[in-house]
Amino acid sequence: MEALGLLARPGELGLATDLYELTMAAAYFEHGMVDEVAVFEMFVRHLPEDRGYLLVAGLEQAVEYLTRLSFDASSLAYLRRLPIFAAVSDDFFAYLERFRFTGDVNAFPEGTLAFANEPLVQVRAPIIEAQLVETFLLATINHQTLIATKAARVVEAARGTGVIEFGARRAHSFQAACYGARAAVIGGCIGTSNVLAGQRFGLKVYGTAAHSFTMGFPHEMDAFRAFHDTFPQHTILLIDTYDTLEGARRATQVAPDIAGVRLDSGDLLELSRQVRRILDEAGLRQAKIVASGDLNEDKIAALLDAGAPIDLWGVGTDLLTSRDAPALGGVYKLVAVEREGQRVPVRKLSQGKVTYPDAKQVYRARDAAGRFAGDALAIVGEVLPGEPLLVPVLRRGQRADPLPDLPAICARAREQLAALPEPFRRRRGPETYPVSLSPRLQAEAEAMVAGLE
């Protein structure tokens, strides 16, 4: 599996799109628009419910896709067989045969916080190239950003106790599981149970044993001893297969140096208190209590509010599917075309789907304490106070600079989250972070509406 995933080899990546991207490409080509340059921007109109921010992730995979995008012979043969392309000229397929992405891309660095209507990715390229990449960019950035954001919520609820991503078996595919694990670590998880993701992305991997392991031995104690014999320095025993408290007592008899125990069912508050007491009275104060079993940020926060002595959390389904908000509605819209050397802004005015025109930059201001104080959308070329967030990623289809590695992305995410004031990070009913338009952008948007009246 390459970093792009299990889905396609490089020559098939041209097919990793929706059909209408290719039908538009053919129509552009047949009408002589191959060299016309367009600017598209990806953004989210409305944040999901109870989300005060987004944590951007997925750019590395998007960039790899863009730099490897092509059509091989079998892909072109398949397209030729589709009835919709029956009247399309051979010249179009010859164009696809030599197709490569040659455009410019600016984007928010991974690990950056973003808010509604801010362009996370901006693509300037010949219009066919810019159009064709829409589906893959949206699928990649939407998914990883969704999971990174969910993970950040869970990690904040855990208040310094560790969160491990446990959700591979509940993900929508194993490809989603791998990229979800990567995104979860960007969001602050200390690691994952997904071994392939661990190897591919350099993540820490964690795991204990299932109830079936305990049930596979004649007695619970036999299973515990077998596990300790095999993993003497890493023994975390699952103690709730039969009687949880009796399991805890048996765990204390295995060895004085077990790393911990795991609770996967029942009243986690009361059980964790009693188990902690059993461990401590046996002199196993170093042993950690790991909790798992349909956890989410609200359940974790409630357990910690009640004083549950839990040290680590394994969070699966709710994290890797973002179950309370399972889709991110990112969109990819045309904002400008270039004609005779001039950038011409365009604007969509569909009811409920209005866009802001022109290529944009986002500036982020901070207060005297370094906390985020508000963002402003501006037209490219304007200079406003604050940090410009869209940075060069590709130039003429080639990487502008090396992308940061995962530890650097995680560090950026931690700093960004720490700089966001608490009202915008609340789990429920967060305040809306201020995002304004520059006077020039506001005037341009209004003028385009007035011009239609």
Image (spheres, grey):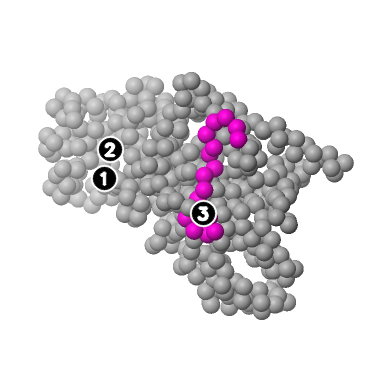
Labels 1 & 2 near each other (Cβ < 8 A): yes
Q: Amino acid at mark 3?
A: Leu
Q: Residue placed at 61% from the left, 54% from the top?
A: 124
Residue 313: give its label: none
In the rendered structure, which segment of residues is drawn in magenta?
A: 383-399
Q: Is residue 302 visible?
A: yes
Residue 208: give its label: 1
Mark found first going from the N terminus, 3 or 1: 1
* Disc 3 packing (10 Å; few <14; some 14–19; many ≥20): many
In-image side of 142 versus 290 (left or right): right
Question: To which residue does mark 3 refer?
Answer: 394
Residue 262: give its label: 2
Q: Amino acid at mark 2?
A: Arg
Residue 425 picture location, percent across and down: 50, 28
The quadrant of the image that shows the N terminus is: bottom left
Mark found first going from the N terminus, 1 or 2: 1
In-image side of 359 versus 450 (left or right): left
Q: Is residue 49 visible?
A: no
Task: Label 2: state its secondary structure.
Answer: strand
Residue 374 picture location, percent across and down: 57, 28
Q: Residue placed at 57% from the left, 74% from the top?
A: 97
Mark found first going from the N terminus, 2 or 3: 2
Q: Is residue 93 above or below residue 250?
A: below
Given residues 279 and 147, the one toward you in this image is 147
Q: Is residue 338 above or below residue 162?
A: below
